[in-house]
């Protein structure tokens, strides 16, 4: 964590298939936002967005990183993973569409709501993906 | 003027008995306890009166403020409200009419069964859930400790709570209104007292959630009157047949009983404050939006597990299940009576629940960001073993206390030991 220039930067490494630690990043983000006294509805949106990003990296990617920066105006969440990338982003953004394995679905995940939920929770949502290489999701949630 | 009720907590500490151990502090779900100079201290803003500390204290230093029976002298007519969970405190072949007579003999003019209010609420909640306008999952308002934990730790879920009073309050409203009418008495002539199984309910009487003022005038802990009730019940000549709730109404006394009575298929019933917190986390993440009703109760087993009960919660829970199953079908409150109560609007909340941001480090966000930075640096210096020797429940709680100016880094014995070692080695000052 780096907190210089009135900005908090939080960094989390997320491992592929690591269901044990999944959820720790979002719960830590939530704790810090509550300590900052941010409105509970905004905290909830940021927590859901981070959680879904975390789960996406765990379920679909080969591993990656989540970087959250907080200033007095905005919460920025960037989820960057190392492949395999998304073939058809438009399709992936549709509610209910999922490429998750049966095993993951049996665990109660992979309902195809991750990306749509992230979009719903953020004020600005961007996704870039290069097949077989990486996916970068950037979200902004305004505090005021 | 400061409203003292704002600060009222039923959970109190007996300094003389407190040994300064860390049992209560480590168990507290809101990190509301610190140990200072070998005595526990409760941070009032954070305390939700769940009573976990009462349960774990090996020295019985934690207790509940309840009333003395002498208070009954202040009223012309006194009513005891007997909770559903009381059914679990006696063996299955006990005649509850005798128990109620035993309660009456403590100095009350009548005894009213809280389960009757549960019957009324069963119908009321069923109707509200049908309206379908509510945010899912709808959260039960039965347990006041759960309501307070939502206020403190999950304020974004406040809108999910169903805005109806608890059976305790509804029972008081029904019986006080009826007694005023039947005996031509004024509101202040009648004393209504709750036989409490937990501190959270005692607090709710003086500092209610969702309403301005409670109809209840005081409370007695079941533990403190149990012996006398048993003695009185044995020798009573009273043959009064009290009005009883339905088996399902009595069932509210155990976890899941409420959802079962209402007849909700897709419900989630969770007991134990730590378990409730874990599920509230899931609800906050939007993972349980498909669940219709969430019944979260702070005590294991539900109200039968309240720390002011006498019987083991599991035994009491099994009894409630059996009694509810075997209860006769007589003396139930009539449908017309229930409808009459519902039309009088004695059950809905009138006040909004206000979020309590007790975790906030500073009201100014720029300052709070700076404090987070300092907090992070402090945390790096601490050993991260959560030993509690400093008087805080964990290393992160100590770091927070230091940032808030409530503690010093030297409170950590490991940090202090290092400093002393350095001083010994180099002769420098610390």
Image (spheres, coloured by chain):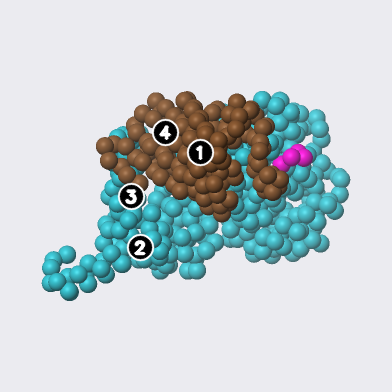
Q: Is residue B321 magenta?
A: no
Q: Position of residue B355 (x, y in %)?
A: 47, 35
Which colour denotes chain A?
brown
**Circle 3 residue:** B376
Identify which residue is drawn at 69% across, 48% down: A103
- Residues at discs 2 and 3 both on one chain: yes
**Circle 4 residue:** A76
- Classify B35 as above or below B111: below
Foreground residue among B214 and B151: B151
* Letter of the chain that mark 1 sits on in the rendering: A
| Alpha carbons under labels 4 and 3: distance apart | 20 Å
* Letter of the chain that mark 3 sits on in the rendering: B
Describe residue A141's horizontal placement relative to residue B69 as left or right: left
**Circle 1 residue:** A134
Mark 4 neighbour class, 10 Å CA radius: few under 14, some 14 to 19, many 20 or more: many
Q: Which region is colored magenta?
A: B264-268
Residue B135 seen in render: no
- Residues at discs 4 and 3 both on one chain: no
Residue A6 seen in render: yes
Q: Position of residue A35 (x, y in %)?
A: 39, 42
Query: Quadrant of residue B99 in the image?
Result: bottom right
Foreground residue among A144 and B293: A144
Query: Does the residue at mark 2 contact the one at mark 3 (Cβ under 8 Å)?
Result: no
Q: Position of residue B73 (x, y in %)?
A: 55, 48
Q: Which mark is residue B308?
A: none
Foreground residue among A139 and B82: A139
Which colour denotes chain B?
cyan
- Mark 1 vs mark 3, foreground winner is 1
Query: Quadrant of residue B19 in the image?
Result: bottom left
């Amino acid at each position: 964590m780096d907190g210089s220039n009135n900005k908090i930067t939080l960094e989390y490494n997320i491992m592929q298939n690591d269901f044990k630690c999944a959820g720790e990043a979002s719960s830590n983000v939530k704790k810090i936002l509550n300590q900052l006294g941010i409105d509970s509805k905004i905290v909830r949106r940021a927590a859901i967005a981070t959680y879904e990003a975390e789960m996406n990296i765990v379920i679909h990617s080969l591993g990656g990183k989540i970087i959250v920066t907080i200033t007095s105006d905005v919460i920025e969440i960037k989820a960057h993973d190392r492949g395999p990338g998304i073939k058809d982003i438009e399709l992936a953004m549709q509610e209910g569409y999922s490429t998750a394995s049966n095993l993951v679905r049996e665990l109660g995940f992979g309902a195809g709501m991750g990306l749509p939920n992230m979009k719903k929770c953020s004020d600005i949502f961007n996704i870039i993906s290069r097949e077989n290489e990486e996916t970068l999701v950037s979200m902004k949630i305004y505090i005021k | 003027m400061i409203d003292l009720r704002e600060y009222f907590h039923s959970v109190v500490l007996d300094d003389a008995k407190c040994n300064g151990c860390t049992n209560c502090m480590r168990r507290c779900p809101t990190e509301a306890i610190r140990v200072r100079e070998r005595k526990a201290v409760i941070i009032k803003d954070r305390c939700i009166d769940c009573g976990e500390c009462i349960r774990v204290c090996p020295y019985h230093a934690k207790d509940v403020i309840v009333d003395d029976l002498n208070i009954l002298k202040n009223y012309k007519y006194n009513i005891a409200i007997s909770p559903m969970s009381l059914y679990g405190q006696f063996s299955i072949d006990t005649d509850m009419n005798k128990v109620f007579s035993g309660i009456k003999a403590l100095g009350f003019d009548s005894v009213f069964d809280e389960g009757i209010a549960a019957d009324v609420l069963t119908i009321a909640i069923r109707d509200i859930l049908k309206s379908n306008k509510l945010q899912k999952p709808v959260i039960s308002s039965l347990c006041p400790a759960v309501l307070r934990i939502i206020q403190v730790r999950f304020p974004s879920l406040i809108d999910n709570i169903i805005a109806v009073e608890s059976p305790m309050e509804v029972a008081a409203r029904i019986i006080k209104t009826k007694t005023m009418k039947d005996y031509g008495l004024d509101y202040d002539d009648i004393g209504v007292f709750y036989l409490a199984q937990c501190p959270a309910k005692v607090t709710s009487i003086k500092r209610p959630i969702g309403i301005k003022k409670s109809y209840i005038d005081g409370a007695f802990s079941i533990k403190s009157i149990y012996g006398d009730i048993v003695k009185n019940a044995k020798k009573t000549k009273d043959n009064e047949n009290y009005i009883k709730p339905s088996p399902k109404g009595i069932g509210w006394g155990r976890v899941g009983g409420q959802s079962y009575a209402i007849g909700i298929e897709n419900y989630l019933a969770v007991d134990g404050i730590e378990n409730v917190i874990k599920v509230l986390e899931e609800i906050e993440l939007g993972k349980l939006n498909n669940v219709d009703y969430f019944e979260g109760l702070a005590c294991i087993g539900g109200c039968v597990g309240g720390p002011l009960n006498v019987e083991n919660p599991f035994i009491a829970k099994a009894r409630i299940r059996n009694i509810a199953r075997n209860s006769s079908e007589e003396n139930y409150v009539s449908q017309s009576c229930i409808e009459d109560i519902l039309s009088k609007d004695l059950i809905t909340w009138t006040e909004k629940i206000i979020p309590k941001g007790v975790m906030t480090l500073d009201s100014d966000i720029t300052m709070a960001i700076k404090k987070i930075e300092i907090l992070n640096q402090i945390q790096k210096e601490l050993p991260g073993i959560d030993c509690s020797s400093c008087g805080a429940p964990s290393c992160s709680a100590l770091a927070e206390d230091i940032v808030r100016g409530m503690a010093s880094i030297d409170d950590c014995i490991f940090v202090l030991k290092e400093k002393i070692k350095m001083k010994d080695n180099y002769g420098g000052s610390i």
